[in-house]
Image: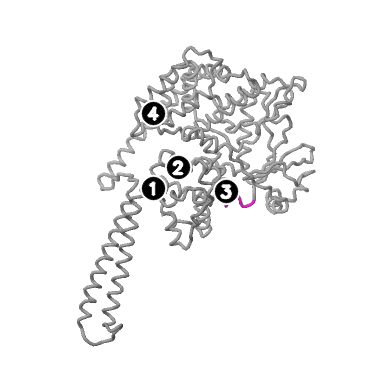
Amino acid sequence: MLIETLDTARDLGRLKEILGVMVRHGFGDTVRRLGLADKLERAGQALHWTHAADLARVEPPAQVRLALEELGPTFVKFGQILAGRADLFGPDWIAEFEKLHSQVPAVPIDALRPQLREDLGAEPEEVFAWFDPTPLAAASIAQVHRARLHGGTEVIVKIRRPGIADTIHADLRLLHRLAALAEAELPAAKPYRPQQLVREFARSLRRELDLAGECRQAERIAINMQALPHIVVPRVHWEHTHERINVQDFITGVPGNALDALTPEAGFHRTVLAQRGAQAVLKMILEDGLFHADPHPGNVFYQPGDRIAFIDFGMVGRLSQRRRDELLQLLLGLVEHQPQSVADVLLDWTGDEHGINLGQLETEIEAFVDQYHGVPLAQLSLAQMLGDVTAILREHHLALPADLALLIKAFVALEGMGRSLDPGFHMATQALPLLKQVARDRYHPQALAGRALWALRRTLSTVEQLPDDMARLLRNARRGRLQVGIDLAHLKRVGDQIDRSANRLAMAMVIAALIIGSSIVMTVKGGPTLFGLPAFGFLGFFGAVVCGLWLVRAIWRSSHQRDDD
């Protein structure tokens, strides 16, 4: 159980805080159904079940957002990740998740100095020719300061908040256990796949904590973008970069949300910027398999010469070659109106799950794509089409793999930015030439020969290992050591119920023995008395009454919990 496996007393206190916030925001019934309130009470903790009356009038999506904001950086980040899961949550939920922002005050420079001295080897004023102690920006995981190298290069210094890693790791431990408990005890939570969501979130957040890893990702994308000279990625200064700090070139230009400054007089052409931005992100996705997963206006700057600079590579998406091939088939199917191609890819992505009417799902996807038949390419909204497809999957309780959910989020953000720059921007028009080029390259005779050779090597390797595998299997069979793994989701719960029933049966037998023994003692004359009755007989009856009341209470509570379920 969750309470029994907490690592530290701090985790128990944090769990009480999390559950208290849930109660205050109207989720007390969920806490009770999880069985955590009683367990906290037995651990010496207590929850306050009152909450503000006005919260009762707030819709559930807003209640969840407010609760996440109150719980702090880890949970705010979790909500921001959920904002990209349109395949799991409806538009009202996504709209609330998108409102989440980390309102975190900056850490004073004096509190950062011990960590900076350890990472830089000296005071920042000694390492840099100039260091601004006032942060340029502050977020939940890190804050950014401006500085200047001794060679005159303007840079930004990104510093991880002291102690934030320990806080996040503790919260992730609790999230993992709460997700497992919710999936086991709350049938309504299963379609949202809480354990899978938390695992994906934990991987993303741990990568974001590694500021040197962020720079490695930026450098890989910079190398991939060398073919597009109008795309700028800040240079990394590795001599000052570590896990808790990174130093990159300071990027100047017009912020992505200051569109009024992008005028021809200032040397900007919005149509060109929209096209170049789309080309860059499409290349990252379709050709390179490594893309900026959060291309919102705050992470984009426009520079003279219609150049585009991307910053903040803490969140990137990765696509294997197989995923890129499937994505190519999906996008070509959407823009060229091939419903069967789209349906095949989506069914492969979501899997053949039990209880899903795959025939009906396939029919709906085909009908959806077919409705765009004959529509001019320039009138297609690729982001809207992807959003509608995920809505169909959500209705059938199907979830996309995490990398693809992140990809769709990037597509939607990209098309939104393109439309804000140029109202006549059409992602489908920009994507189709690149899609066809990638498809031609994919099926070029040389590429086909390379894949055939790789497949042949794998086949030969498998055949080579087959005799050893068969010999190992037969040897284990002769020794009686063959094992079959069966995963029963509720086996532990059944065992707990049997254990409780056995305990109650034993208690009933003890009560019966006390009653019979006390009755016999009552007939024996002499010995100490209590209230005029034989003392041992009286104490035996009293113990039987107490044990009987406990047993009745336990049976009543168990019956009450089953009724709630």
On screen, residue 171 versus residue 258, left or right, reads: left
Around disc 3, counting alpha carbons within 10 Å, would you say few (fewer than 14), some (14 to 19), or many (20 or more)?
some
Query: Residue at coordinates 48% horizontally, 28% vertically from top-left?
Result: 323
Q: Earlier in the sequence, mark 2 or mark 1?
A: 1
Residue hosting label 2 = 194
| In the depicted structure, whether residue 382 falls above or below residue 297 | above
Residue hosting label 3 = 70
Residue hosting label 4 = 459
**Residue that extends furthest to the bottom in the rendered view of this protein:** 526
| In the depicted structure, whether residue 492 falls above or below residue 62 | below
On screen, residue 273 versus residue 154, left or right, reads: left
Q: Is residue 202 visible?
A: no
Amino acid type for the residue under numbered disc 1: Glu
Q: Earlier in the sequence, mark 4 or mark 1?
A: 1
* Callout in the foreground (4, 1): 1
Residue hosting label 1 = 185
**Residues at discs 4 and 1 in contact (Cβ within 8 Å):** no
Q: What is the span of residues highlighted in magenta in the rendered image?
A: 162-168
Around disc 1, counting alpha carbons within 10 Å, would you say few (fewer than 14), some (14 to 19), or many (20 or more)?
some
Amino acid type for the residue under numbered disc 4: Thr
* Callout in the foreground (2, 1): 1
Disc 2 is placed on an element classified as: helix
